[in-house]
Amino acid sequence: MSGLALDFPAIETARRRLDGVAHRTPVLTSSTADGLTGARLYFKCENFQRMGAFKFRGAYNAVARLDPAQRAAGVVAYSSGNHAQAIALACRRLGSHAVIVMPRDAPRGKLAATRDYGGEVVLYDRYREDREAIGRRLATQRGLTLIPPYDHPDIMAGQGTAACELIEQAGPLDVLLAPLGGGGLLSGCAVAARALCPRCTVIGVEPEAGDDGRQSLRAGRIVHIETPDTIADGAQTQHLGQHTFPVIQAHVRAIVTVSDAQLVAAMAFCAERMKIVIEPTGALAVAAAFGGGLDIRGQRVGIIVSGGNIDRERYAALLAGISREGTPLRSTGADGE
């Protein structure tokens, strides 16, 4: 693998493993979006994936890779949302047990969905306790296998299958835009794009308030930041992963940022003109295409729409531009894309 945690054969293997299990999500187009950008845009809609986000791809791939003894013992993960649901669903389908460390103030809908998928939820105080430490302790005490949200080769390989499908469905791309939190999605998609479209420019998209990835790429090392104050909860991570960062260094051309206001505008466009519901993190790449300072005119551009899991009250309030307190709504925790 040339020293990297991920190569294209691992993604191809993940595709075979996910065949008939993960949804082959649609690629949508919009003449209005094309007119606004001067480009030909292809929206890979992972909001239609099982449990509503791309996370199922990596979670299923990682759990399926466990040996029988590990699967029988069970899995532990930490997450406030999409990874939690993905691991719980993957374990249910594969006959394993999932223990999910989730914050007490996680959205009620995500807590309920995780439990509905069969996950055993262990609550913690995000402000006083360390979820990673709790996950490691549970793994040791109960003999569970820890599967983190993004910094894991099998997670990265599974996420990369989204880009494989996109390129297969849309044809060769000039540019690929993908959300960036911890780097699992971006690194997997970048490896897939490099193999299938060698001339494709891969660009990561972060929230303006949390540009640790952009800083890291410029500095040549992983930069740690405080938890960013952004509505893009899936990209509220503090740093890239030890596995994901080298892959991003090798295969990603640039990282751009977008504001929360741009995310809401992208969500509104998708609702009004494309008739799809996407969550703030899922809107990162869309927002970058519309106003991320990129010159994509005349190019074929792939856009990873990473998910659509958002409570209806919060979704309505964001599109209205208000919250009950009269301030922009903020997220309740990060998984990392």
Image (cartoon, rainbow, N blue to C red):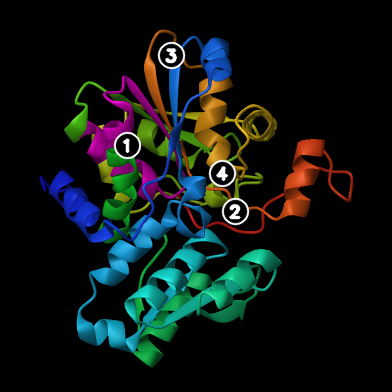
- How crowded is the residue under tag 1: few (<14 C-alpha within 10 Å), some, or many (20+)? few
**CB-based contact (under 8 Å), mark 1 and mark 3:** no
Residue 210 numbered tag:
none
The residue stretch that appears in magenta = 166-194
> Which element carries disc 4, helix, strand or loop?
helix
- How far is disc 3 from disc 4 in space, using C-alphas? 21 Å
**Picture coordinates of residue 76, whole percent (x, y):** 41, 77
Q: Which residue is mark 2?
A: 309
- How far is disc 3 from disc 2 in space, using C-alphas? 28 Å
In front: mark 1 or mark 3? 3
> Which image quadrant is residue 112 in?
bottom right
Amino acid type, callout 2: Asn
Q: Left or right: where does residue 21 sit relative to residue 229? A: left
Q: Which residue is mark 1?
A: 220
Q: Residue at x 17, y 44 (%)?
A: 8
Residue 296 numbered tag:
3
Vertical relation: 175 (above or below) 135:
above
- How crowded is the residue under tag 4: few (<14 C-alpha within 10 Å), some, or many (20+)? many
